[in-house]
Image (spheres, grey):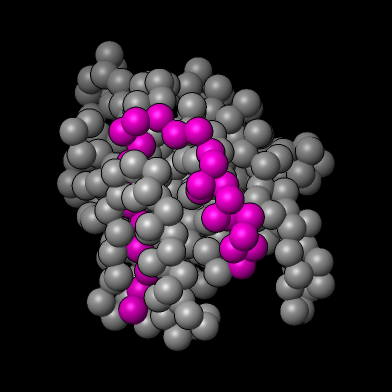
Amino acid sequence: MVITWDITIPKLTGDAPRRAYVYLPNRAEEEPEARYPVLYMFDGHNLFSDEEATYGKSWGLSDYLDYTDTPLIVAAVECNHSPDGGRLSEYSPFSFEDPGLGKVVGRGRQTMEWLIKSFKPDIDSRFPTLPDREHTFIGGSSMGGLMSLYAVTKYNQVFSRAAALSPSIWFATDKLDRLLRTAPLKKGTVIYMDYGSREMKFHSNMSQRFSRVVKLLLDRGVWLDARIVPWGDHCEASWEKQIPFFLSTLLYER
């Protein structure tokens, strides 16, 4: 079951509404005393419904969770659709130069501060969550994948596990590397990270860059599940196929 409602994020987009989504496992109605881990995700409009997905194809995440009877809550929010780089700005921890947009001011920190201080408390108060760090995960793809890496390292006291699918690790590399080298991390931090084999041609030296991030995470003692997806591409249809892989990592021993 997917529940939706409109929210605002005043510090990012004022009074402009956007859609929030919460997936509840079917068993939640049958077992009202049960509590569940929560996976917070980016680009909520692309997760559940083809009709709402930006390119007409969603991840089909609720269908998979229903079919497998997975004991997990998923909470997500629609991205900023502003054509002047709203999504890039909100989903980037770092400011950068974009060839088409010019300078994009990274507002990833504001996004995460809102998610942690406003959205998460609301979810925990309204739904049957396990709110502690050990049962709080974060995930996303592309810029959302970058934000997931950022969140699980910068806010490691909140998130114990992350799924970063096709993360945008190819810009602001010095700043990202510095974060991965220096952020305080608790023992037992788990990260799933993948990249599609067909994506490797999109950016120069992408395999070396992927290897660099893998090494930084391993050097920090992260329990890492890293994959190159055979014939994987940069699209929802490809990320949908990775659902069994990243969920098994996030929920392993949980």
Asked if residue 248 lies left or right of residue 45, the reply is left
Q: Which residues are magenta?
A: 171-197
Identify the residue shown where x is 48% and y is 80%. 205
* Residue 96 screen position, x and y as percent: 73, 64
Asked if residue 237 lies left or right of residue 71, the reply is right
Question: Is 62 or 97 nearer to us in this picture?
Answer: 97
Q: Is residue 106 above or below residue 34?
A: below
Question: Is 234 or 50 nearer to us in this picture?
Answer: 234
Q: Is residue 45 above or below residue 55?
A: above
Residue 230 in which image quadrant: bottom left
* Residue 52 screen position, x and y as percent: 52, 60
Asked if residue 128 lies left or right of residue 75, the reply is left
Q: Is residue 121 above or below residue 143?
A: above
Identify the residue shown where x is 25% and y is 46%. 249
Whether residue 184 is in magenta: the answer is yes
* Residue 99 screen position, x and y as percent: 75, 79
Identify the residue shown where x is 50% and y is 41%. 153
* Residue 67 screen position, x and y as percent: 19, 49
